[in-house]
Amino acid sequence: MGGAMVNSPNIQIQPATVAINDKGHLVIGGADVVDLAEQFGTPLWLLDEATIRQATEACIAGLANYPNAKVLYAGKAFCCLAICHLMRQLGLGMDVVSAGELHTAISASFPAENIYFHGNNKSEEEIISALTYGDVKIVVDSKSELEMVARLAEAFGRKAKILLRITPEVAPDTHHHIMTGHTESKFGIHLSELSAVCAIAYAQSHVVELLGLHSHIGSQAQELEPYMQIVEIMAECYADIKRTFDSDLEELDLGGGLGIAYTRDDHPIPIFEWAESIANQVITSFGNRDLKLPRLLLEPGRALVGTAGITVYRAGHIKRNPQGTTFVAVDGGMADNPRPAMYEAKYSACVANRVKGPQSAEPTTIVGKYCESGDIIVKDTNLVARTGDLIATFATGAYNYSMASNYNRTGRPACVLVNEGKAELIIDREPIADLLRYDRVPARLLGKET
Ligand SMILES: Cc1ncc(COP(=O)(O)O)c(C=O)c1O
């Protein structure tokens, strides 16, 4: 299939269904954002189902010429029951990194064998749940974790199906906090130790089945080159393993990390092209070494859900500093989107109730309501906003809900899935009463001391 025929929504800042109606309001998924804000309140996360479907279908289409491939959804990007059900229906497996994500995937009826359990410090309880659910694949991050998995599998009388995560020493062009494949990364087994760790796995083959290797080079990658390099490195590792252990590994998991467009400065690879190029490179690199083609796994998260999401805020107080910047404070901020404060992530925004409104010659900065100076949502826009306006931030579908907190004792926003004019609540707004749910007060502080 030609890439030009497949829509890759990760390269567009706004959801695929974005429109402006005759009232000048922002519309996504056929629903008027102003009406949704009235109905569900603000701040509000909206997810456009059509964008998620298109991104997922483009990724699957990119792998169509590879004989045996599967896309896993990296749940860390946005993990809730409705999204997991949708991803399962679309034919994906799932990448999880905690007992909570694993429980969500199982609750959304993912077959255990389509779940890959990552993480650099899984607890014994987490490994035990993976073994208990069945053939969840455990992506082992270190020699000591391998020993722990083997011990627990033996104790449970089960054979653990594992992949080994390697540190490939390939770094994408991204913020250093979201690089994971470079030498100093906390993740994975260094290439120089791989053979020794494989030897342990093969020696434990009565309790551990080594299926393949995994790598994930980092996130928000904009270039193909690091992926091409990683495939070559992996092919070399598979050839070494075949030579040393006379074993053809069955699976190859190349992680996720594909970037999305947050602003006009971002130029990520279209997801179709990303998947297709990786698949072609695997065919070439493995073919050149006469290796059997492994089952190919890709694990995108951000690129499947990122540009499907928008966050809708209500503008409150507005002030202007002596340098000429106007600050528009909204009713959310770093508790629903910590990424700007964490790693200076940039976003794009519009006034949802007046999309084609006037533009300001002087900078307008959209700030949150939290007690941190770094709580800035979008810096130096040219929006003209008034108190009561709705500000929509684009490309907030990934790593917003999943990284949200209760900072300043605030409940997390609601999330609504929109599709063909229908709006369905998929996550309730967290009520303030719930924030007290796990608080315990020693009797002496209640004046009940005897
Ligand atoms: C092992 C692994 N796979 C997949 C992903 C998904 O990355 P992204 O959402 O950037 O595609 C991550 C992100 O941290 C990861 O650690």
Image (cartoon, rainbow, N blue to C red):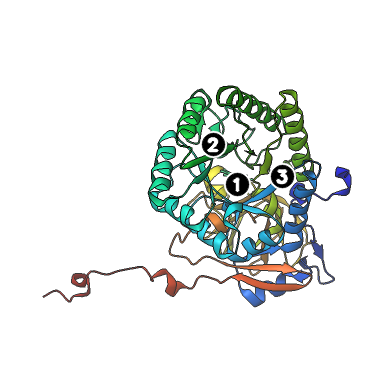
Q: Which residue is mark 3?
A: 69
Dot 3, how many residues are within 10 Å of its Cα: few (below 14), some (14-19), or many (20+)?
some
Reply above or below: 131 against 22.
above
Which residue is drawn at the image coordinates 78% and 72% (left, top)?
421
Left or right of 344 in this view: 347: right
**Camera-side residue of 345 and 323:** 345
Dot 1, how many residues are within 10 Å of its Cα: few (below 14), some (14-19), or many (20+)?
few
What number is the disc on residue 165?
Answer: 2
**Camera-side residue of 66 and 347:** 66
Q: Which residue is mark 1?
A: 323
Q: Does residue 334 appear in the picture of this structure?
A: no
Reply above or below: 330 against 161.
below
Image position, residue 34 (x, y; %): 71, 71
Query: In terms of image quarters, where does ligand 1 lie?
Result: top right
Left or right of 354 in this view: 135: left
User: Which amino acid type corresponds to the residue marked 1 in the rendered image?
Assistant: Gln
- SS label for mark 3: strand
* Total number of numbered discs in the rendering: 3
Spatial CA span between label 2 and label 1: 50 Å
